[in-house]
Amino acid sequence: MNALSLFFPAGERMFIDAVRAYRDEIPDPDLRKAATAFIGQEAMHSREHIEYNQLMDAAGLPASELDAQVWAHTEYVKKHSSKVTPLLMTIALEHFTALMGDTLLRHPEQMAGSQEDYERMWRWHALEEVEHKAVAFDVYEKCVGRGPKAYAMRSAIMLTTTATFWPHVMMFYRRLAAADPACREAGWRGHLHLANFMLGKPGYLRRLLPEYLAYFRYSFHPWQQNNADLLAEIDELVDDAEAAYAEHKAA
Ligand SMILES: [Fe+2]
Ligand SMILES: [Fe+2]
């Protein structure tokens, strides 16, 4: 989770800029409104993850160094590619956040034993990722198109994004684990435990494979996986967070 958190400040900045670059071209007023809401939500996530990553720094983990690598990568992409590339990367990565958000909400046992605020923060992010999962995708279809060329571009960028994002998650995980005394002590047993958790049993990442592959269907749309039922949790989460905040203020 910490390795993933390192991608959000720069990543979500790229999502915001990518959608903003098309906002004035969106023909449908409802989608334009959704794009504005998307930008607002990602800006809030990014702000929380900046703070989160600072806590990692304070705990002696190389967070700002790794965060700087993500910024360098997204800046490079923005500078050296056409306007559509960051949007294509956004819809690819939004597919990942939607799938991971779905798993996190459906299997809260994944975070059993976590500090409460930490868990609540991830649940909140997961919910909003599910809530806005189709916004950047719809912006792409409305502003760039839906034909064979649009399909080929989104599939190609999904492949390159998959091939760059996950190895970086692994690399960042290795760096964080190497800097953490408890992880160092767990050694290979710890890594195997994680690998089994993600890919073996229960295999939270492995189980996402069919939904991941659905992205390559010609007629794919994020809401074909209808998980809007999960959003009912939002009100409960807001109440929880407000109660915790009131408690914190009283203390
Ligand atoms: Fe987000
Ligand atoms: Fe998002």
Image (cartoon, grey):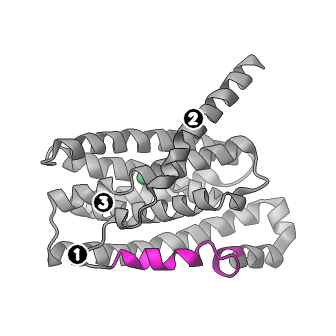
Query: Which is in the foreground here, disc 3 or disc 1?
Result: 1
| Amino acid at circle 3 | Pro
Q: How many marks?
A: 3
Mark 1 vs 2, N-terminal side: 1
The magenta segment is 197-216
Residue that sits furthest to the top in the current view: 250
Residue at the image position 40 percent from the left and 71 percent from the top: 161
Majority secondary structure of magenta residues: helix
Direction from residue 57 to residue 207 in the image, left or right: left
- The crowd level at tag 2 (other Cα within 10 Å; few <14, some 14-19, many 20+) is few
Some atom of ligand 2 lies within 8 Å of the CB belonging to the residue at label 1: no
Residue nearer the viewer, 71 or 149: 149
Task: Locate residue 115, reporting x and y percent.
Answer: 76, 46
Q: CA distance from mark 1 to mark 2?
A: 38 Å
Viewer-proximal residue, 65 or 153? Answer: 153
Frontmost residue, 82 versus 43: 43
251 relative to 165 in the view: left or right:
right
Q: Which mark is residue 187?
A: none
- Callout 2: helix, strand or loop? helix
To which residue does mark 2 refer? Answer: 238
Query: Residue 186's image quarter?
Result: bottom right
Q: Which residue is mark 1?
A: 151
Amino acid type at circle 2 is Val
Provide residue 90's location: percent of width, then percent of height: 35, 60
- First in sequence: mark 3 vs mark 1: 3
